Amino acid sequence: MKMDNRLVTLVFGVLMLGGSLARVVKVSPGPLVRVEGQPVSIRCDVSEYSGPREQDFEWMMTRAADDKQLKIISTFDASYSHKSLSKRVASGDIDVARIEDNEVELKIAEVRPLDAGFYLCQTPSTDSVISGNYEARVQLTVIPNTLRVSPVAPPPVVPEGSELTLSCNVTRELTHPTYLSVTWSVKRGATSEDILVFGPQRDVVTGAKYARRYADGGIRLVPGRNGQFELVISKVTTSDEGIYECNGSEWTHENGGKWIKIVESKREMGTVAVTPTGQSLSVTASSSSPPLLSPGETLTLLCSVAADNMAVLAMEVAWLAGDRDIVAMDRSGVVISNTSSSGAPGKRAAASLERTAAGEYRLALRGVTGEDAGPYACRVRAFIEKGGRSSGGGARWHMAAEKTSASVTVKVAQTKPSFTVTLEAALNPQATAEPTELACHVTNITHLPLRGRLGVTWEHTTLPGIGNDPQTSNPIGSLDGHGNLLPGAMYSDRLKTGVITLTRVQPHTFKLRFLRTQEIDMGQYLCSVSSWSVTGQGDMVNTAVHQSSQLAVRWDTKHPTLNIVAKRVREASVGGATFEMSCTVVTENLGEAGYSVLVQSQDSLEGNVRTIMTLSPDNVVQHGGATDPNRRDGLVLTKSGPAEFRFRLAGVQLSDRGFYWCDITAWTKQQAGQAWTRATSAESNKVKIDFQENGPSFAVDLLSDTSIVYPWETAKMECSLSVSGSSPKTRALADDLAYEVRWFFTRLRGGLTTTQVASVDRFGVVRKDTRNSSSDVSVERKDTHTYVLNVHGTQDSDSGEYHCAATPWYLSASTGVWTQAGELTSSRIFLTVRFAVWESLKLPLLYGVVASIGVGLFSLVLGLVCAHCCCRNTIHTPRSRNKLMELEMD
């Protein structure tokens, strides 16, 4: 019963839904206006229908509203067309194209006047219930093609920056309300781009590349009467070249709100070429002055500029003397005079530039000198206004061309200055380090121009055998026309620090002075004097150079020498006494100097030299590398006189015995504040420290219980010392004796590479050195004369040769101070760390056997338990017959 109710409800709903559908057929909104000979398309679609998705369509027409209908074409009946239209359908002039299942398009390739009328789109019914509309109609009006486009040919060639006018006449006969538009475009190669479109609603649309120029006024539209339209492009550039076209279009405005282009006509206007400014620009420089000018006369030069587009050009004109601008006139007519190349302001009042006529610029240079001679040229930069305004509010310009004229050579009569140069020694040195002064005199000066100046250059040639290259003449330095000092490369540092000075002491006298003359300064000297003139542009130029004869500067060279005498001031006859020595310096051929002192010593005349202390020329004391840091308080080195130094050593020991002397170096300075310069050095005689100390004698030996150990065991090596001989005190007392003990390790037997393992100083401080083994070491003092080295947790890397070295210290009987005895070295013991195979394997084997037995017993017990618990007999209980009956009933 429930199933029947559901079926009734579903059928009722489907019927209700089908009843609510209403077929809707629509065509393109009209009325449609088209031009004879142009294509026409009319769309038709159906919606809200039932039946198959793909619908069929039939097209009919009437030439009047109540006229007889003509069958045009059908989507399902090929023989549907009226016989008057069948040929056009067969040729494809009339066709129907399916766009969607429910939409088609009627196409007429070339519409004819007889095609005007009402077009009816009809859809056969596929609905179960007739509802809605099954046809729709639209009116088509066909008007004659009266559109005419007549362009005016533009000029084939226009100069850059000029104005280009593109005229085009677009008309049509107004048989029906239609609208016109005109489009200008330019074609370059295979691509064409629109410049501007006007219409159909009198609106203006510009191409993407021309929007800025149109907004700035660079492109203007001038509509005329009777269909005449003009497009004006101002400030044309070479990028505006191309083939220009004019396109006229006729438009209709349909009820749907769309503008429809119904016909268009494009005409080529002509090719336009733009002549670049640089191609037509010409610049000529000429002179209206005599071929040879006398100094003080006025030079007049004329710059003539011509171009095809002079009216739109703004000129920037500059005159060049050689490769340097001397005066310029900018686009606005402002004259700018440049400064001289040397940076000093030139006499620019002598140069003037003015515009005398269109394209004519005159340069006047008054009061010329010989330095104004040379080539002159006129440089012109032509600018074209781009249109619009820059960000600063001014006009925008771009440089269209730049040209420089051929040079005009200007000649000025010139008389070179004449003078005589002599060189003399105002102060001649007699020895090294004395001052030297040379004077360069300029006399008999003639033809030196007004504001002319003199400069000087000093040169030096060393004597043979002095310096690196005696044949080379080295410049010391020079003073130019402005008085600037230009030092030579070899003398730059001495000139900067004032050791050498170059001066002008009088208008015509120059001096070279050495504060402290060195031996390398001997040789031949000469001075070269140059005359300098000021040009009309304010530059200093060299006009003449005259040299003096060479002057020899030399003296008898006496090399400085030092004689150093060392003598004993206090003698150390016993250990612990104080030793004092003085070193006195006697000099020859050496002025004021400073001294550096090295106090040096050696155990014997053939022994190694050790530096004990040093004293610098600035009296800075430093200890040498051979000085024990614990004894530095007992060492003193002082300057006891202008050329005398004293060295004191307190608490001498046996290790201090040997020879002592002074190594002294003399240093000089060119002047105060400068660095020291080494002059000479010498050594003194040697003073000996020699005394006897009847102290005890010592011996050392290295002992070990065993020389073979196994890994992780502890190896013990005992360094045993013994003492014999006399001592003022009982040797059993630990306070009389102390030892410094060090242990050393060598990897190979008899090897040379030895590393220190550990040490203990005489105060009992133990130090362990860094080792590459994982084992550890410790030092144990058993008694006053016995020290033990323990190597804990020995490894294979600990195998090698060991020995110990000891330095005894004892309390001196004669001085009561601690005295260091000579170092003792023990014999060597080779320690071997063996790897015990059985000892290393017996425990793992025992553990494996025990584990195997345990796992076997556990498995046996587990099997018995499982068999006992899981294999018992169970009582079978038969299934009830009643239960089977119940299941069968279900």
Image (cartoon, rainbow, N blue to C red):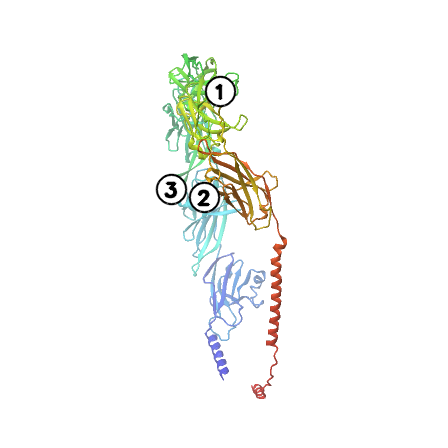
Position of residue 673 in the picture relative to residue 711 (left or right): left
Q: Nearer the viewer, residue 876 or 780?
A: 780
Q: Secondary structure at mark 3?
A: loop
**How many residues crowd mark 2 within 10 Å: few (<14), some (14–19), many (20+)?**
many
Position of residue 369 in the picture relative to residue 719 (left or right): left
Instruction: Note whether 292 is above or below 650 in the view shown.
Output: above
Query: Mark 3 or mark 2: which is in front?
Result: 3
Q: Secondary structure at mark 1?
A: strand
Query: Mark 3 or mark 1: which is in front?
Result: 1
Percent position (x, y) of residue 67? 49, 67
Q: Residue furthest top?
A: 444
| Residue on which disc 3 sits | 391
**How many residues crowd mark 3 within 10 Å: few (<14), some (14–19), many (20+)?**
few
- The first of marks 3 and 2 along the sequence is 2
Q: Nearer the viewer, residue 508 or 439?
A: 439
**Alpha carbon of mark 1 to alpha carbon of mark 2: how far?**
77 Å
Displayed quadrant of residue 594: top left
Percent position (x, y) of residue 179? 43, 54
- The first of marks 3 and 1 along the sequence is 3
Q: Which mark is residue 474?
A: 1
| Residue on which disc 2 sits | 166
Percent position (x, y) of residue 693? 49, 30
**Alpha carbon of mark 3 to alpha carbon of mark 2: how far?**
31 Å
**How many residues crowd mark 1 within 10 Å: few (<14), some (14–19), many (20+)?**
some
Position of residue 353 in the picture relative to residue 862 (left or right): left
Query: Mark 1 or mark 2: which is in front?
Result: 1
Q: Residue furthest right?
A: 838
